[in-house]
Image: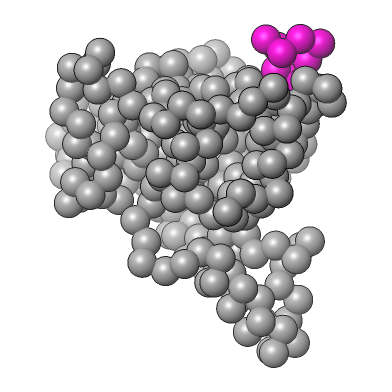
Amino acid sequence: MESALWRQISSAFSKPPTRPVARHLRLATRGVTPYSTTHVNSDHSLQSDLFEGYNKHGWMDARRAWCHLCNEPIGTALSIHVGDRDHMNMTLMLFVAATYPRQNNPRATVTDARLYLRRLGVVPFEGGKIGTEKFHATADLRRRQELRALLSHVMRDGLVGDSLRGNAQPAHAASGEKMMKDEMTRHVVRAFPPMSAGQMTQLTHKCWGRTNLERLYDALHLDALRSPEKPVLTTKDAKGSVMRQLFFELFSALARVHEVGIECQLRSLILDEVVRRLCFELVFLQSMAYMAAVNNVWEQLEYPQQQGVELMGLN
């Protein structure tokens, strides 16, 4: 049964897409195993190759100059999209939502949740939507409190601190950005299905971008760790710069601990854990921002699974 959104999308073209195989399934040309294993799919139940789905035109209404996936206007021509990078990443998130192994029916689960909340006299959430990020609030708070405690510990230990107190050199931000990219990419590789180099670039750039660094700065309430005489940061450029300086300090401290060798095991473990958790939070925050937006589109499409998305030819 076709959803209302799918009928609206397909009506913008002379005929709907009929290609039965998704564009990211290129097993013969890639020459790699068709079985992709991630922490989500440890039993090889999901069969797919490198994800490189970018059927941009499938989501665009030429008459209205509108993208149904991003819910925003496109450029002056169909070859130009206002948010190309966001569009590619949201396509990936829709694929992840559709292929995630589940035993429950998403539509029934959301309906039952809304009925249950109404019986309790609770308004479902903003706009009547049940965003998945709302269910993680308690766990997120606990996890970030632990990360903030670790940061406070390494500051008291004298390993880092200049960046958070506002005393670091601005030039260290550029070096910190380069140093954190390797660890960030490892987290993305572990968390998501295998993807092409282009798709990996689009996602990782958003994860370590200034907007996402500002999200993490605010989520950890790092303003409280700044020196009292320093002004409160209000722009994403300033907050992003501090986060990059912090990564420079952390990686530099790791190198110094290995060189000195004093309590190296414990200090290295703590520093490694801080870096790992910071990178995880950045990937998590950006992913949840995309998932919150994609969830509305997935609901309008009536929760298609992997085969349904492939038949639509939208990824």
Does residue 44 lie above or below 33 as drawn? below
Quadrant the N terminus occupies: bottom right
Q: Tell me which residue sits at (69%, 90%) in the image.
A: 119
Q: Which picture quadrant has residue 242?
A: top right
Q: Is residue 12 left or right of residue 213?
A: right
Residue 191: horizontal and vertical position, in percent?
Answer: 35, 42
Q: Is residue 38 left or right of residue 165?
A: left
Residue 200: horizontal and vertical position, in percent?
Answer: 41, 23
Q: Main secondary structure of the magenta part?
A: loop
In-front residue for pair 36/228: 36
Q: Tell me which residue sits at (65%, 42%) in the image.
A: 6
Does residue 76 lie above or below 230 as drawn? above
Residue 236: horizontal and vertical position, in percent?
Answer: 70, 31
Does residue 280 lie above or below 13 as drawn? below
Residue 65: horizontal and vertical position, in percent?
Answer: 81, 22
Q: Is residue 64 left or right of residue 22?
A: right
Q: Tell me which residue sits at (69%, 41%) in the image.
A: 7
Q: Residue furthest bottom?
A: 119
Q: Tell me if residue 212 is in the magenta stretch.
A: no
In the rendered structure, which segment of residues is drawn in magenta? 73-83
- Residue 231 showing in the rendered view: no
Q: Tell me which residue sits at (62%, 73%) in the image.
A: 111
